[in-house]
Image (cartoon, rainbow, N blue to C red):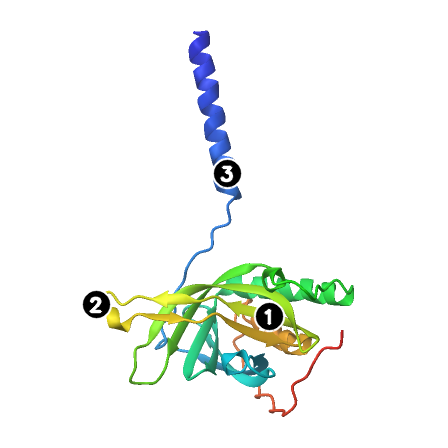
Amino acid sequence: MKFLKKVTIILFLGLLVSSCQTTGRVKIDDFTVNMNSPKITVGEVELQFETMMGMGKLKKQNVDVFYFPKEDAVCLTYKYEFYTYNQFWDRRGRRVFISALQKYNEDYEARNLERNTNKTQLKYGTVRGYLIWQQAAFTVQAFANMNVDLGYTFKERSPYFTIYQRDTEYIDENARDNNRISPNLTMYFTRAQAAELAEIFEQYVNNLPSDYEEPPSPGKKDDIPKDIY
């Protein structure tokens, strides 16, 4: 009888530990978006990319922003090295971005930013995104989920809030020649630029208002702004 009680207690404790471990894990769910779904044009945001092959100074680009109501996803559409990319953010990703920017601004104001480390680009968390990329209208349209790291880095002696888009692979089950791998890619934001995107994300974290009107697109500027640190 005592032996059975001991066995029962051991099994119970084992199940309890297993349950706690499972509950403690953070599950990041994949999601998909159909490019043919209805979409709303939101406007543009400014950001910087590295030049081709990473040579030279950062290059500014105005990135188109769309909202896909059916999938509740915000899309950043941009061109880089002859490809067009559509980077999708679900609601969870948008919330994490807003929180990450708040933490970055706190570190910035407290002068806690580190200059000489490669780990800062993932300091504020990782989210799951969805990517659709294509070289031309007549070429393969690749798609896959990917990880997106949120953090910061210094470029040209100035700090930038960063979105680090991890590489991902599209696998065509019917034609191996159609397989594609997207590159690792970093988006660089000044605090003002990141705030513009956070404002859009915050708008689409809540339900879209019934009287929503498309905002005017921001004017283009020639000089790349920098944050003094």
> Which of pointers 1 and 3 indicates the residue nearer the eye?
1
Amino acid type assigned to the residue bearing label 1 in the image: Thr
**Disc 1 and disc 3 in contact, CB within 8 angstroms:** no
Helix, strand or loop under label 1:
strand
Return the mark for residue 162: 1
Q: Residue furthest right?
A: 110
Does label 1 or label 2 sit earlier along the sequence? 1
Residues packed near mark 3 inside 10 Å, few (<14), some (14 to 19) or many (20 plus) = few
Q: Where is residue 26 in the image (x, y as percent from the top left)?
A: 51, 49
| Residue 107 placement, left or right of 44 | right
Q: Is residue 179 left or right of residue 223?
A: left
Q: Which of marks 2 and 3 is nearer the N terminus?
A: 3
Q: Which of 185 and 218 is in front in this view?
A: 185
Residue at point 34%, 77% (across, down): 36
In terms of depth relative to the viewer, which is nearer, 134 or 89? 134
Which three-letter amino acid code belongs to the residue tagged 3?
Answer: Gln
Kind of element beneath mark 3: helix
Name the residue type under label 2: Asn
Residue shown at the point (47%, 14%) measured from the top left: 6
Which numbered marker is on residue 21?
3
Residue 99 in percent (x, y) is at 63, 62
Q: Position of residue 195 (x, y in %)?
A: 65, 74
Label 2: element kind: loop
Q: Quadrant of residue 152?
A: bottom right
Q: Which of 201 and 76 is in front in this view?
A: 76
Which residue: 70% across, 66% down? 115
**Disc on the earlier residue, 1 or 3:** 3
In the picture shown, does residue 153 fall above or below 29?
A: below
Q: Name the residue under label 2.
A: 174
Q: Tell me which corner region of the image, top left, top right, bottom left or bottom right, holds residue 171.
A: bottom left
- The quarter of the picture where the C terminus appears is bottom right
Residue 21 seen in the current view: yes
